[in-house]
Amino acid sequence: MAHDPDAIAKLFDASPFVAFLGLKVTEVEMDAGAVTMIMPMRPELARGGPIEGQFHGGAVASLIDTVGDFAVALTAGAPVPTMNFRVDYLRPSGGAYLTGRAVTRRLGKSMAVVDIDVTDSQGRLTAVGRGTYSPKVG
């Protein structure tokens, strides 16, 4: 797997779901095991109902899982399976886009732990996540 945003973005084309989310890689920090992505607001990702302009929680969770996966995949060399992840929603996520930044906290032989922060287009922290992934490929 390549380690630059353009090469990672090409991998998104192989996943219809990731492409549907409209994710874009904005930063890759190999030494830190970190990846940053943005997810633009689209009607399909909105919470709906009487509250307009807010992302659905499922879309936020998908951003968290995907950016966490790719933080581990940088080292593993390929997309990796999710073992578990959790989300804490801190405030409604709204605006033109969300930014997800994942930092690998521990990368072991059988498990990796990643922390993910989600901020809105105004820079406010809206959700945090922690994922565990299996760095073994194949």
Image (tube, rainbow, N blue to C red):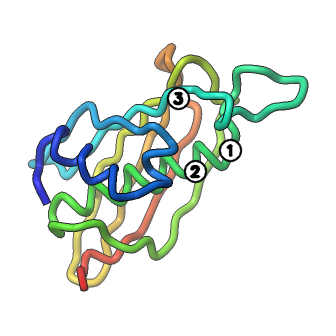
Choose between 9 and 82: the one closer to the eye: 9
**Residue receiving disc 3:** 125
The disc, 1 or 3, on the residue closer to the chain's N-terminal end is 1
Residue beneath the point at 67% across and 29% down: 43
Check residue 61 in the rendering and tell me which mark sits there, or answer none: 2
> The C terminus lies in which quarter of the figure?
bottom left
Q: Position of residue 100 (x, y in %)?
A: 42, 38
Check residue 57 in the rendering and tell me which mark sits there, or answer none: 1
- Badge 3 element: strand
Residue type marked 2: Ala
Whole-Å distance between the Cαs marked 1 and 2?
A: 6 Å
- Badge 2 element: helix
Q: Is residue 120 above or below residue 81?
A: above
- Please state if 106 lies on the left or on the right of 69 as rendered: left
Which corner quadrant of the image does residue 91 belong to? top right
Whole-Å distance between the Cαs marked 2 and 3?
A: 14 Å
Residue beneath the point at 57% across and 26% down: 41
Q: Residues within 10 Å of mark 1 (few under 14, many from 20)?
A: some
Which corner quadrant of the image does residue 104 belong to? bottom left
- Please state if 117 lies on the left or on the right of 31 as rendered: right
Choose between 113 and 62: the one closer to the eye: 62
Q: Position of residue 117 (x, y in %)?
A: 45, 40
Choose between 115 and 15: the one closer to the eye: 15
- Badge 1 element: helix
Q: Is residue 80 above or below residue 137?
A: above
Check residue 97 in the rendering and tell me which mark sits there, or answer none: none
